Image: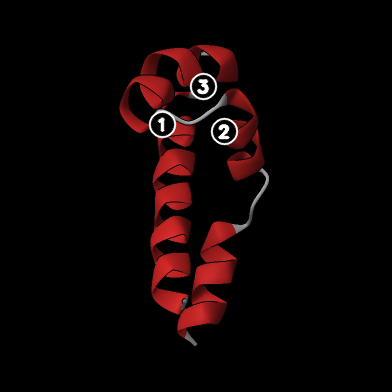
Amino acid sequence: MAYNKINKLQLIIDIQNIVLDFQEDHTNEWIYSKKIYPVYRISRRTFYNYLSINAKKELRELLG
């Protein structure tokens, strides 16, 4: 089970890093429609849920 959680947290971190790279010049809506959805095929709701998760902290705690 931990293996799947680690992979999901790494996916969330990847998505959050993409948002950080483009956030200065673009809206979250543009980032979702142009950069996230074509690659990851997640819903808008999932995208915003992922942005609200402190994935780096959870991954650190999981890996101990």
What's the amino acid at mark 2? Phe
* Mark 2 burial class by Cα count in 10 Å: few <14, some 14-19, many 20+: many
What's the amino acid at mark 3? Glu
Q: Which residue is mark 3?
A: 24
- 29 vs 27, nearest the viewer: 29
- Can see residue 60? yes
| Placement of 7 over or under 23, stated as above or below | below
Q: Residue at x 42, y 22 (%)?
A: 37
Sequence-wise, which precedes: disc 3 or disc 2? 3
Residue 8, by quadrant, is bottom left
Q: Residue furthest front?
A: 1
Q: Residue furthest bottom?
A: 64
What's the amino acid at mark 1? Asp
Number of marks in the image?
A: 3
Q: Nearer the viewer, mark 1 or mark 2?
A: 2
| Label 3: which secondary element | loop
Q: How far separated are the C-alphas under marks 3 and 2? A: 18 Å
Q: Residue at x 49, y 88 (%)?
A: 64
- Would you say 4 lies left or right of 52 here? left
Q: Residue at x 40, y 34 (%)?
A: 18
Q: Which residue is mark 2?
A: 47
| Label 2: which secondary element | helix
Name the spot of residue 41 as percent of width and height, x first: 40, 28
